[in-house]
Amino acid sequence: MINKRLAIIFPKDSKGFYDPSQRISFGGATVQLDMISKAVSTKVMRLDLLLPDYHTIANPIINGRGFVQLFKNSDNFLVKAFKTLFVLIKYRPHYIMQRGLTAESPFLSLICRLIGIKYVFMFAHDIELMGYYQNSRKNCFFYPLLLKSSSSLVCQNHHQLSNLDKKYHNKHIIFKKGIPADSIKADSTIEKKYQALWIGRCVKWKNPEMFIDLALRYPDKQFLFLCIKGNDVDYYASILKKVSDIPNITVVTYAEHSKIFSFISQSELLCITSDMEGDCPMTLIESGAMSVPVVAFSKEFNSDIIQYECCLFANNDHDLFLSNFEKVFSSSALYNKMSEGIRMYVETYHDIEKNTNNLLTKLIGN
């Protein structure tokens, strides 16, 4: 066991992950931080999970990992800052980890630096390397402060590192997200009811319309559309209206995380229509663990995945995306090769235990 105290800050929507009864959507960052916290819980002297509004969770103790309320989401900026400072002084972690850029991130990094806590920032999306928030795509004015005050800057691959200001490369750590792949495998007895699957929050940069277009173009195939409400309620309503009269698309508007693998197991192919991602999204890793290959609208997520020939990328070319979709179903030999390849890729690069051990080793070394 490492004689260090670690705190992990969870996104404000994480309460929906831990208490499904609230039916609040959550993102891949929450899923990944949960995986990391499970992996490190027995390796550090103390682990605190810091979560806004945790008091609304029915069971605040999950598998022996307890939550600490950071602040209320309704608090104003100054109150959030003072409450955060109080929590940090009270629990005094050696390291504090946050994934994904928020308005509070730069100031949190500064507070940690001033009181002697090592702040570890993990980039959740490629666009954050440019100083923009993932969902709103607005500029984070104090992003340079985050880079300067952080103890470590965690990139998901070397492409992200190449977009990081070179004067901060001495702070970098490469950490690939992961899952316990050994305990998640495909079940050949489950019927494949759907040819194509889409999973994600309904936000514009994920381009859910592209999946709807596939359903219209291929009425002989069945599509499963797991579309979770995002912050833009009007946009979400417009998407649901578009799919309401399409007979070959099944719409699911909410699912707790434990049921996601059931949807994946019933599907032949995962479609990722985002214009860009931060390395491999969690949906790809989860699908890959169950041997479900992928077609993606964007460019390749990283150089490692290419050699496994398990995901067809379209480089943001809509015609190529359509062609790749047809290509997967045109040859059973190709499909089987991609299915085997994506499982091998996930086992090789996204083992959460191995990746977390490497992360801890590098953190302590810094």
Image (tube, helix red, strand yellow):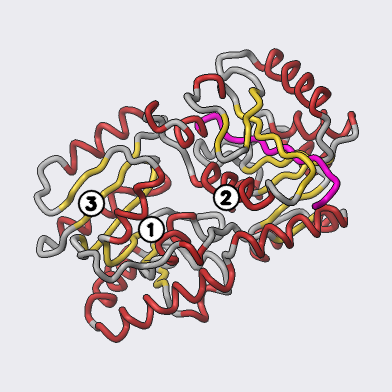
Q: Amino acid at mark 3?
A: Ile
Residue drawn at point x = 79 percent, y = 43 percent: 45
From this view, report whether residue 123 is shown above or below residue 10.
below
Dominant SS in magenta? strand
Q: Amino acid at mark 1?
A: Ile
Give the x, y percent position of residue 277.
51, 55
- Callout 1 secondary element: strand
Q: Tell me whether circle 3 and circle 2 mark residues in contact (CB < 8 Å).
A: no
- The residue carrying mark 2 is 35
Q: Amino acid at mark 2?
A: Met
Q: Quadrant of residue 6?
A: top right
Residue 109 horizontal side relative to residue 226, left or right: right
In magenta, the rendered stretch is 1-13
- The residue carrying mark 3 is 212
From this view, report whether residue 158 is shown above or below residue 235.
below
Q: CA distance from mark 1 to mark 3?
A: 12 Å
Q: Nearer the viewer, residue 49 or 41?
A: 41
How packed mark 2 is, by other alpha carbons closer than 10 Å (few <14, some 14-19, many 20 or more), is some
Sequence-wise first label, 1 or 3 = 3
Tag shown at residue 272: 1
Sequence-wise first label, 1 or 2 = 2
Magenta stretch encompasses residue 8: yes
Give the x, y percent position of residue 206.
40, 48
* Residue extending farthest front: 64
Sequence-wise first label, 3 or 2 = 2
Q: Tell me whether circle 1 and circle 2 mark residues in contact (CB < 8 Å).
A: no
